[in-house]
Amino acid sequence: MKNQVTKKLLTLVMASVLSAGVLAGCGSSDAETAVNSEEAVTETAQAADSVAETETESTQETEAAEVEDKGTITVAASATPHAEILEQAAPILAEQGWTLEVTVFDEYIMPNNVVESEEFDANYFQHIPYLESFNEEQGTHLVNAGGIHYEPFGIYPGTKSDLSELADGDTIAVPNDTTNEARALLLLEANGVLTLREGAGLEATVNDIESQSVNVEILELEAAQVARVKDEVAFVVLNGNYALEAGFSVSTDAVAYETSDSEAAQTYVNVIAVKEGHEEDAGIQALVSVLKSDEIKQYINDTYDGAVIPFED
C-alpha cells in the first residue's frame, strides 16, 4: 500500500516538475528550475511517507481491534515464582484474546479450595503428590491440567554453613505438610544426616527416622514459615519458591539440593490444577500452552538461577 501511494504521488510530482520546466523557460533560469523541482520532489516524498505511516498505524489499530475477546482466566498462585511466571504469560495470552487475572496466596489451602468451589479457573503453586494428598484428605476433585516446572528442594544454611558442623542439640527446620516433609527428610537422608525406615518413601514423617548421624531436632513448620526461622536454626530445608523469596540461590547458597535427574525432582513437577472436568476448557488449554512455550521457558532459565527448571513432558 505504501509503495502504491508513493508511486502515485511521485507521478503527480513529475508532472508538476515538467510543468514547472515549461513555465521556467518563459522567465526563469535552468538553475532555479532545478532547485524548485528538487524541493517539490522532497516535499512530495515526505508527504508520501506521512500518508504511509498513517495507513500503517491505521492497519495496526484495525488488527488490534480484530483480536477476539475470548474471556478471562482466573488463577490462584504463589508469589514466587508462579505469579511472576504468569505475569510473563499475560501479554502473550492477551495477543490471543485472553485476559489473565492472577491472585496471590501465601499459603496452600485456599488456592485449592477456590478452584474446587469454581471461584477460580485454576491454580499454579503445587506439585502432583501434594495435589493427590490434598484430594484424599479434603475430598476435593482437583486434577493436573499440565506440568510446567519443577523446583529442586534444597538444604540452606541457618546458623551453620556446612552439614559437617552439625552437633547434638542442633535444629533443622522442615515443611510440615505430608509430601514436602517426606521430600525434605529424603534429602537429609541422601546427605547422611539421618536414616529413614525402609519403604517410608514419599510418605515419610519424623516418626520414620530410625537413626541420625548426630542427635538433631527436626522442627516441623508450615512451609511458608520455614525460611523465617533461618537465623534461629542450624539449617532449613526449603521448597524452591520459598527459597527464592528468602533470597537464597540454589547454585550458590544451597548446602545440598535435588539434582535435575533425581526421582524427586521429576516427581514434584509443579502443575496447573483445575477442578475435574475443566482440563479441556479453551482458556485452560491456552494457559498451559503459553506456559510451556519457548518464550516462558527462556524466561524461567534466565531468571531463576537453577531454582526453577522448565518441565519437559
Image (cartoon, rainbow, N blue to C red):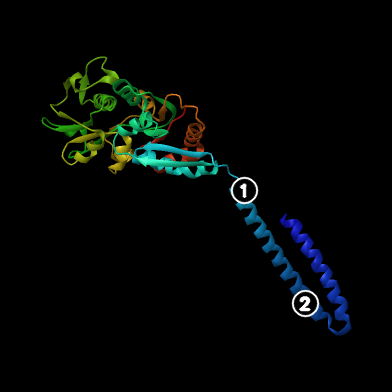
Viewer-proximal residue among 90 and 261 = 90
Q: Which residue is mark 2?
A: 36
> Is residue 101 in sight in this rendering?
yes
Answer above or below: position of 13 versus 220: below
> Is residue 305 in sight in this rendering?
no
Residue type, label 2: Asn
Sequence-wise, which precedes: disc 2 or disc 1?
Answer: 2
* Res 86 → quadrant: top left
Q: Nearer the viewer, mark 2 or mark 1?
A: 1
Viewer-proximal residue among 182 and 1 = 1
Does residue 209 appear to the left or right of 78 in the view shown?
A: left
Q: Residue furthest top?
A: 198
The residue positioned 67% from the left and 63% from the top of the image is 50
Residue type, label 1: Glu
Q: Which residue is mark 1?
A: 63
Pointer 2 local density, CA inside 10 Å: few below 14, some 14–19, many at least 20: some
Question: Where the N terminus falls, by quadrant?
Answer: bottom right
CA separation in Å, label 2 and label 1: 41 Å
Answer above or below: position of 279 versus 41: above
The residue positioned 23% from the left and 33% from the top of the image is 222
Does residue 25 appear to the left or right of 66 in the view shown?
A: right
Pointer 1 local density, CA inside 10 Å: few below 14, some 14–19, many at least 20: few
Q: Which mark is residue 7?
A: none
Local secondary structure at mark 1: helix
x, y (%) of residue 250? 32, 38
Does residue 131 appear to the left or right of 302 in the view shown?
A: left
Number of marks in the rendered image: 2
